Amino acid sequence: MSQDPLFALAKAAMERSYSPYSKFPVGCAIRTTSGATFCGCNVENASYPEGTCAEAGAIAAMVMGGGDTIKDIFVIGQADGLLTPCGGCRQRIREFSTVDTRVYMCGPEGVRGVMTVDELLPHSFGPEHLADHEKAAEKS
Ligand code: THU
């Protein structure tokens, strides 16, 4: 089976990672529902908790590029098992996802697993909760 071109983009992004502290490079590539692609890598710094994840970089690039809905998102790292997005990134991805969004978890050799956002972050909190709240506040 031929590899989705998003895999190569995510892998190239991983190669740009700045991760001298964790030594755990991660790459991410997004395809929006309009077909545009955006990439990001994790970027660390000497104040360890202040680093940013690859998904956060790719989502920031997407927003800057005018994208708003993620169709496919590939995350790649050199974990032994399945490299699933961290909790914070699940929420970041969720913001720009639909039920059709697919999260592809990859190792250097290819895709290891695919999940929906709801599988990764069940019963999630999202923008519609705030919209419901606003509507309720308008009524009262
Ligand atoms: N990392 C990501 O970039 N994405 C994830 O979903 C998991 C963790 C990065 C953060 C840090 O630079 C390194 O991997 C080790 O935690």
Image (tube, helix red, strand yellow):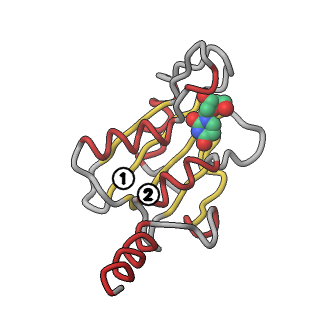
Amino acid carrying label 2: it is Asp
Q: Is residue 27 above or below residue 99?
A: above
Relative to 130, 52 lies left or right: right
Secondary structure found at label 2? strand
Residue farthest to the bottom?
139
Above or below 130: residue 108? above
Ligand 1 image position (quadrant): top right
Mark 2 and mark 1: Cα distance apart in space: 5 Å
Q: Is residue 108 visible?
A: no
Mark identifier at residue 72: 2
Q: Residue furthest front?
A: 140
Q: Kindly indicate the quadrant of the structure image that contains residue 38.
A: top left
Ligand 1 within 8 Å of disc 2? The answer is no
Q: Amino acid at mark 1?
A: Arg
Which quarter of the figure is the C terminus placed in?
bottom left
Question: Is residue 100 in sight in this rendering?
Answer: yes
Q: Is residue 88 left or right of residue 64?
A: right
Dot label at residue 31: 1
Q: Position of residue 40 (x, y in %)?
A: 43, 34
Q: Give the crowd class for mark 2: few <14, some 14-19, many >=20 residues within 10 Å.
A: many
Residue 117 in the image, given as x and y percentages of width and height: 55, 64
| Residue 26 appears left or right of 2 | right
